[in-house]
Amino acid sequence: MNRIVIKVGSHILTENAQISKERMKSLVELIASLQQHGKEVILVSSGAVSSGYTKLQLDKSFIPNRQALAAIGQPLLLKMYQEKFDKFGIICSQVLLSAADLDSRKRTEHAKNAINVLLSNKVVPIINENDVTATEELVFGDNDRLSAHVTYHFDADMLVILSDIAGYYDKDPNKFDDAVLYKTHSFLSEDVLNAEHSANNEFATGGIVTKLQSAQFLLENSKEMFLASGFDLTDIKSFLIDGVQKGGTLFKA
Ligand code: ADP
């Protein structure tokens, strides 16, 4: 496995309405270590809206305000990443995409060419949805779906989703104490994939549904997905670097 896409959601990057410097630092350390182990890493990062909100407190329930906050926050977020990557002598770069870009073969090809040049020069592409022109991931999914498309179109072997949950369970572990973690998973039923999701109810099943839809898309396209905790990177480190699965869920056909 050489090319990996890592997706980190805003819940992981944000703490007390600010970008958590500690968590960003751990993530950057992980990416630097993966590079040292010969892997190419593409990062899909949310967090622009939260960054923007630290400068201007617009009402986030209104979508155009979230778009504006993302426009304010995106350069701030990248600046924070670059400061952290500097410590490892790694250059990072900003790539803003929308799902529609990847619907067009020509635009996908253009993006892929640029990504290939970046990766071959050991630059980390940091991808986010272009929230000013597209709002799909801003409303649903928090980049879950975009990251699955990025994995497929940019020829990565695997998508890693770093989440507030340590894997996929037989039921919601935040509601049921006896929920059991699936170590591997290969079949996702229609019921599970079509469960109702709502952008305004982030504690409903929505959060996991967009991840499962991403897993399904990747399984259908002969790719793998790993869902693991983004709060504690121990499981993902041992899986990607030592090849040992201690926790997390591997979606594999
Ligand atoms: P993130 O913000 O980290 O991308 P979300 O909070 O959007 O993740 O989605 C994960 C949430 O999905 C979990 O916190 C959990 O409450 C919920 N969830 C519902 N059903 C399940 C399940 N079967 N396995 C794991 N998580 C589940």
Image (spheres, helix red, strand yellow):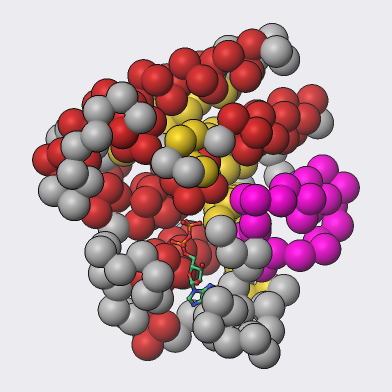
Where, quadrant-wise, is the N terminus in this rendering?
top right
> Is 162 or 249 nearer to us in this picture?
162
Residue 174 appears at what percent x and percent y? Answer: 55, 77
Specify the segment rendered in magenta.
227-250
Is 144 situated left or right of 101 in this image? right
Q: Is residue 212 magenta?
A: no
Q: How many marks?
A: 0
Q: Quadrant of the C terminus?
A: bottom right
The answer to whether 189 is drawn above or below residue 39 in the figure is below
Residue 42 against residue 223 in the figure, above or below: above
Where residue 163 sits in the image (x, y, percent)?
55, 56
Instruction: Give the residue at x 59% y 73%.
Output: 168
Q: In the rendered image, is residue 184 in sight? A: yes
Q: Is residue 32 left or right of residue 3?
A: right
Q: Residue at x 27, y 48 (%)?
A: 138
Q: Residue at x 31, y 33 (%)?
A: 53
Rendered residue at 51%/20% (across/down): 80
Location of residue 64 (image quadrant)? top left
Q: Is residue 249 magenta?
A: yes
Where does residue 150 sit, x and y in percent of width and height? 43, 43
